[in-house]
Image (cartoon, rainbow, N blue to C red):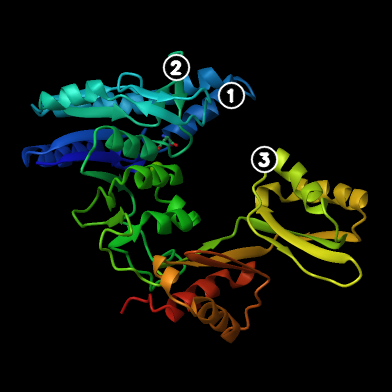
Amino acid sequence: MSLIVQKYGGTSVADLERIRNVAKRIAKTYEQGHQVVVILSAMAGITDHLIDMARDVTESPDKRELDVLLATGEQTTSALLAMTLKSMKYPAQSLLGHQAEVLTDHSYGNARIIDIRAEKIKELLSDRQIVVVAGFQGCDPDGNITTLGRGGSDTSAVAIAAAVNADVCEIYTDVDGIYTADPNICDKARKLSVISYDEMLNMASLGAKVLQIRSVGFAKKYNIPVHVRSSFTEEEGTMVVNENSGMERLIVSSVTHDKNQARITLKKVPDQPGVAAKIFTPIAEEGIVVDMIIQNTRAGGKTDLTFTVPRVNYKSALKMQKKIAEEIGAEDVFGDENIAKVSVVGVGMRDHSGVASTMFTALAKENINIMMISTSEIRISCVIEEKYTELAVRVLHTAFGLDKE
Ligand code: ASP
Ligand code: MG
């Protein structure tokens, strides 16, 4: 007998018929003798709809009340599922975030989980009940309802799995697993049977489309195996696990891309202590996340400095830098929005050399120019012209032997 946490996303509970299908799947797991805790999202589109309604009331809705409103999406599906299970004669009970004792900080709209006592969940489980918990919501120490950020029910699921010490956290979604590349642009992409937490964390957009990335950090910290799979098939999905759990360590397990970046260059910056701080402090104060930074050596006490920012922040960052350039005496500032970042990710990189040269050679063969490079222990990223993104993903996928037969 295992303790299984199952999380169903918005498309899996989009209407009453799908909720019935979910109930059947849960019933099957329960009949096998397992203990089951279910975490739900709101019906697909409902959270967006609630946000739109709030914005129709006022341009900037009160944050506390917005969370009270948004939490109703998950309250609805939890009640409907528990009701469905009971009508099928299964013992089930729904719990809202505060009833499940999901304690968070005060940050409405993007709260962080501080603690989950889960006493009520454990009590119901020992009574052979199926426990249905509303995802995405918690409450702060003063008892206010909070929500965990978009896609937050994944984090609810993994955190509750950690709190009850579950054997596995199954995430049911509308894709059937994690792929070696985006199947929409690389038709030779394969579904991975296993991937490590660190690889998921480094896959950026490719991973984030499937799981709220914060949930992966939780899973890693508490060593909870996460099974990403589809609620529309019986097929196994992808296991996200600790890399020391005996999984095959592929040198490169995925090729990812990110078109949401832009590049800013400051030309002929005085090469003096304190200049980089002057350039990046105002950016940090605006909450803009800088991903890559390159600084060249240069003659005459001047240097060029290039960095990337999220494309949504490009215009404001560029404006800011024009002002800073004047203050510090840099010659020019310019930027480029038509860039993309392609990355190769794999834990096997830790003990293999030659990954970078394979990557650069594959891009060179297609005449794709590399504008910036950055590396971490298990990832190599190159910034290239945006128009080559798809081509770059495909040639890298082939170069690292990831193509399916
Ligand atoms: N319903 C919330 C959202 O749409 C949380 C979730 O689905 O995970 O972001
Ligand atoms: Mg989701």
Per the image, the residue denoted by label 3 is: 287
Confirm if mark 2 falls within 8 A of ligand 1.
Answer: no
Q: Residues within 10 Å of mark 2 (few under 14, many from 20)?
A: few
In the shown orientation, is residue 394 left or right of residue 320? left
**Residue 240 image offset from top left, x and y in percent:** 32, 54
Q: Residues within 10 Å of mark 3 (few under 14, many from 20)?
A: few
Instruction: Identify which residue, 144 or 177, lies in the foreground.
Output: 144
Q: Which mark is residue 56?
A: 1
Inspect the image, locate mark 1, and give the three-letter code of the amino acid beneath it. Asp
Per the image, the residue denoted by label 2 is: 141
Residue depicted at x 53% and y 77%: 359
Inspect the image, locate mark 3, and give the three-letter code of the amino acid beneath it. Gly
**Residue 272 image offset from top left, x and y in percent:** 85, 57
Inspect the image, locate mark 2, and give the three-letter code of the amino acid beneath it. Pro
In the shown orientation, is residue 100 left or right of residue 183? left
Instruction: Identify which residue, 331 or 50, lies in the foreground.
Output: 331
Nearer the N terminus, badge 3 or badge 1? 1
In the shown orientation, is residue 351 left or right of residue 170? right
Instruction: Identify which residue, 53 or 257, lies in the foreground.
Output: 257
Quadrant where the image shows the C terminus: bottom left
Q: In the figure, 333 relative to 253: above or below? A: above
Name the element at disc 1: helix
Residue depicted at x 45% and y 81%: 399
**Residue 156 image offset from top left, x and y in percent:** 36, 34
Q: Quadrant of ligand 2?
A: top left
Q: Residues within 10 Å of mark 1 (few under 14, many from 20)?
A: few
Q: Which mark is residue 100?
A: none
Q: In the figure, 384 relative to 204: above or below? A: below
Report, in whole angstroms, how far the alpha carbon at label 1 lies from the one at label 2: 30 Å
Residue 98 shows up from this direction: yes
In this view, the mark in front (2 or 3)? 2
Name the element at disc 2: loop
